[in-house]
Amino acid sequence: MRYVQVDTQSDPTSTSQPSTEKQKDLSRILVNELHAIGIADATLDEHGYVYASIPATSDKNTPVLCFCSHVDTAPDCSGTGVTPILHKQYDGKDIVLPHDATVVISADNHPYLKERIGDDIITASGTTLLGADDKAGVAIIMDLADYLVQHPEVKHGKIRILFTPDEEVGRGVAAIDMAKLGADFGYTLDGGERGHLEGETFSADAVVVTFTGISVHPGYAKGKMVNAIKAASAFVAMLPKDEWCPEVTDGMQGFVHPVAIAGGLEQATVQFIVRDFETAKLAQYEQRLRGLVDKSAEQFPGLTTGFEVKEQYRNMKEILDQHPQVMEYAGAAYKRAGIPVQRMSIRGGTDGSRLSFMGLPCPNLFTGEMGIHSKQEYVSVQDMEKAVEVLVHLAGIWDEHAG
């Protein structure tokens, strides 16, 4: 509840690293708290990353684990002036937030709340998001660090702590020093419902389509002008409305999604995100999209087009399948904590998606954060406590299997 009161909203329009300096306000607090509990090597670097170590208590050659969460909150909803509220022993009724009574967290709209009756629920006050995404993960890792330092009898290998900025704007691992991190396997703490274990994400590309027309004074434009705005509009109108888009896809289905359109008479651009769990399908989607570009361009003689593809991230499953113990040990830790395991696929990405391809196989564990990126965000204290318990078991399981 202290952490969420620090405004750490990231900025997708910024080119700095981190995108907002205020993210470091929380990171400095975390470093100071880590020092206070006895973790002397906790540091904050110029890029906004917090690195710290929980020393090993085992003599085995146990792989170094990294537990990771992000400090930033989403730009989708204000994170300024967050007032957290603790609702003790939630009774199942609607939670009406006091600073805006029109914001109501209801079990009808949030079915998971029905499973958390009796828990202590934390919400914001109705004017901001809460920031449990991902300060719940931060709090879980901090509580783990405090517990393990106080309980050296718990056998585990070296554990690295990593707190990142800018996850919400897609740059959470952009400047990580992997050599400095020095971990073998990792887990992000950025999932939702208790029991969810996520080892699969979308693979993702970004596509920018450019239409370049011919600008002529409109009074003398007959037979000469080629309007890029109209060309871009004709192209967008060709996109399917009943398939291939996020509005009508779910489960394991991918999509192609226009996210921005801009420009003028002479040049216009349309930006897309392209997603699927099978990486090979991205090229198929992009080929189909390019075909629609060409077809629309036929209506505008003299028009030229551009088609740029940029890789964003890849399905972590491609890496995790090469290291099955990473998911197996996590599942075993859930079971030791008395939690049924639900293996889930993320219709999106996490820091772990890119970390996995940077040499740190890294699935995602639950935190209890729900209703994220909105004023209806909430988290169960008991979910967070269970997540800490899972991490203690997980560290021990890795040590048990070490040579």
Image (cartoon, rainbow, N blue to C red):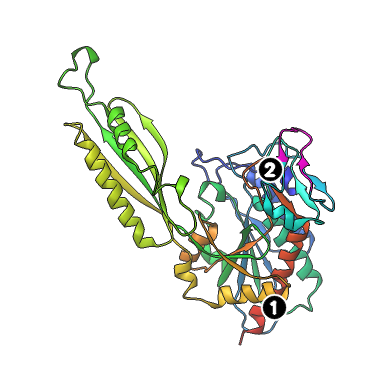
Q: Is residue 23 magenta?
A: no
Q: Secondary structure at mark 1?
A: helix
- Residue shown at the point (46%, 59%) measured from the top left: 252
Considering the numbered disc 2 on the image, is that residue within a helix, a strand or a loop? loop
Res 120 label: none
Q: Name the residue: 82% across, 51% down.
A: 91
- Magenta run includes residue 94: yes
Q: Is residue 319 left or right of residue 168?
A: left
Q: Amino acid at mark 2?
A: Gln
Q: Earlier in the sequence, mark 2 or mark 1?
A: 2
Q: Is residue 362 above or below residue 69?
A: below
Which is the main secondary structure of the residues drawn in magenta?
loop
Estimate the spatial distance between the alpha carbons at disc 2 and disc 1, rounded to whole Å: 36 Å
Q: Residues within 10 Å of mark 2 (few under 14, many from 20)?
A: many
Q: Is residue 23 left or right of residue 150?
A: left
Residue at 23% across, 23% down: 215
* Amino acid type shown at disc 1: Gly
Vertical side of 306 occupied by 220: above or below: above
On residue 396, the disc is 1
- Identify whether 96 is placed above or below 50: above
Is residue 93 something that shows in the picture? yes
Please provide percent x and percent y for residue 158: 66, 74
Q: Residue 376, labelled with which disc? A: 2
Q: Quadrant of the C terminus?
A: bottom right
Report if the CB atoms under discs 2 and 1 are less than 8 Å apart: no
Magenta residues (range): 93-104
Residue 394 visible to an observer of this rendering = no
- Which x, y percent locates residue 187? 60, 66
Q: Nearer the viewer, mark 2 or mark 1?
A: 2
